[in-house]
Amino acid sequence: MVFYALFVKKSDLNYLTVENISKSYGELTLFENVSFSIHKDQKIAFVAKNGSGKTTILNILSGKDEADSGNITYRKGLKVSFLSQETELNDNLTIEESIFDSDNTILEVINTYHKALKNPEDEDVYQKAFEAMERFNAWDFETQYKQILFKLKLEDLDQKVAQLSGGQKKRLALANALINKPDLLILDEPTNHLDLEMIEWLEAFFTKENITLFMITHDRYFLERVCNEIIELDQGEIYNYKGSYAYYLEKKEARIEREAVETNKSKQLYKKELDWMRRQPKARTTKSKSRIDDFFEIKERAHKRRKDHVVQLEINMERLGSKIVEFHKVSKTFDDNIMLNKFEYMFQKGERVGIIGKNGTGKSTFLNLLTNTIKPDSGKIILGETVKFGYYTQHGINVKPDQKVIDVVREFGDYIPLKKGRQISAQQLLERFLFDRKKQYDFVEKLSGGERKRLYLCTVLIQNPNFLILDEPTNDLDIVTLNVLENFLLDFPGCLLVVTHDRYFMDKIVDHLFVFRGEGVIDDFPGNYSDFRTYEDSIPKESEKKTEKKQWKKDSSSQLSYNEQKELKNIESKLKTLEFDKKELETKFNDETLSTEKINELSVQLQQIIETIEEKEFRWLELLEKLEN
């Protein structure tokens, strides 16, 4: 979603000012009198607990929602792109048409040029389109947007949006936001639905690009490496931290300690003033009335409490026997795509395994085989008699119509067994997961995304599993809940299998990795994700064969005419695009499901691109030779 601000702000560097905005839904007050500002070149992370109104604030900034009070002021003419959790794409368009469906002038120029190429007989139209490409330097822009789509695994530009998965749609919306090159980019959980390779690319992209960011993210490595400021909404107050995530943690802890000291001082002063109040006669002097007014302020400060309740995770894990899960020469193939090939492994007590690999390499297949959702083509999977799985899937909780939070837990019983023969009521358990008595009787569909995930986590853990499988558990959970979950998992005595793109979470939790390479190859790497990246980066990679293109500068003694200088520049830009198209097309041949007809079609296209490259390079060399003479 892209829009242009129509408001004026005095300072050219001040992009956005939020003044005293408030929002309530019935009796529920999300936030009151929230104020902050965004300036050019800031990369800000917006941090708050689940259910405190983070996404609501982003929706207010984008115009999707309205504040009950307060003002939002944008700099006049500011171009803003907004990436929400819910994508807004036209299902009838292709990927490429979706990119062109914007107010971006350069994209309009590129689109006009593409149309002109389809009707080369109309020379006037083609010439105007070509000159426009020159004037706006659109050749490089076209290469850049294709590279963004390629990095986000959106290679088939003719694919209809309606055919895309939810994750692909989110990536297309992200691509749209990046390609439009806004002055200010507002993002709600940009790393959700991205694999590790994409996240690291996006991290590098934001680090080097001069772009102003305001985003919600739970990815702590991403936050640490991209953002230079953190704005926190805590207990209804806004706090600014000009620094990284590590700096924020340090300063927040110091602030909380300082507040605790001030509260204690207020309590001591309150006791003293309370005694004075009790001893005062009814007749008041002006001085005593002033002291009485101060007394009520002191009382408020003395009774100020932090609502720092954290999730309390406790389960009555059933004992694991000596035999847990054994894979014996397990193979699985889908439509000639090999997912597992005679895979052998025996899980041991207390194992903590992370699973990584590109999409389509067999990660989900492995989990489905493990949980007996699908059967292997050959080989055996043997489960120990004492194994009890707890499977936290990406799909989350199944919400029934008009189901309340308390009803979800009561499906497992009114009382839940804990350790050492103790038990806890459904209400008490929900309180441990930060659902107060009032919240427990809310309808589940009213919960925020993070609150739903927290409720789902509750339903998985109360079944007392001894083998936990967590498939993307960090999506939508706030950082506070993530820290509690991590500490719980560090003490979890059973087996643990984690699929996640959260590198921080994986580094803290797992001892070794299953690396899915594709074609049924699964490597067992002894270390966490950062260890793996260090190892992979240390391996020399086969250098790609590239034609080195030198940068030539023309001077006053150049032998090229003005039109030839233009032609040389055009050829250099066009060659970049052709090389990218060639590489993209060659990638498509890796698809083993291609029919003979499709292979022949792609071969013809590839040959045409190669011939065009050779033709352009020949003319390029001719012009260079003339330039040197």
Image (spheres, helix red, strand yellow):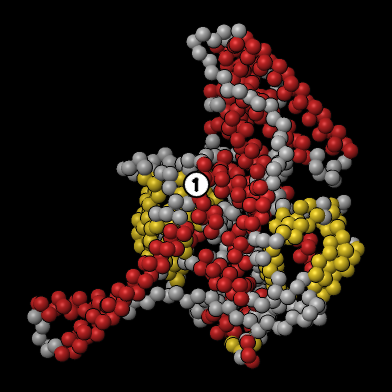
Q: Residue at x 65, y 47 (%)?
A: 537
Is residue 88 or residue 386 the one in the foreground? 386
Task: Please state if 600 lies on the left or on the right of 457 as rendered.
Answer: right
- Is 529 above or below relative to 96? below
The mark tally for this picture is 1
- Please provide percent x and percent y for residue 80: 48, 44
Measuring 75% from the left and 35% from the top, which residue is drawn there? 585
Residue under label 1, please give it.
185
Circle 1: residue type:
Leu
Residue name at image x 44 percent, y 67 percent: 30
Would you identify the image quadrant in which residue 467 lies? Answer: bottom right
> In screen coordinates, is 72 left or right of 207?
left
Left or right of 343: which side holds 545? left
Nearer to me, 21 or 291: 291
Residue 3 makes an appearance in the image:
no
Q: Which residue appears farthest toward the bottom when viewing the image?
A: 421
SS state under label 1:
strand
Q: Residue at x 76, y 39 (%)?
A: 587
Q: In the figure, 219 relative to 24: above or below?
A: above
> x, y (%) of residue 396?
66, 67
Neighbor class of circle 1 (other Cα within 10 Å; few <14, some 14-19, many 20+) is: many
Q: In the rendered view, would you say 369 is above or below 140?
A: below
Residue 263 seen by the camera = yes
- Horizontal and vertical percent position of residue 239: 38, 61
Q: Is residue 626 left or right of residue 184?
A: right
Residue 127: image quadrant is top right
Quarter of the rendering occupied by the C terminus: top right
Looking at the image, is 264 positioned above or below residue 378? Answer: below
Q: Residue furthest toward the right?
A: 378
Residue 465 in which image quadrant: bottom right
Using the image as rendered, state which of residue 534 and residue 244 is in the foreground: 534
Q: Position of residue 425 (x, y in %)?
A: 59, 87
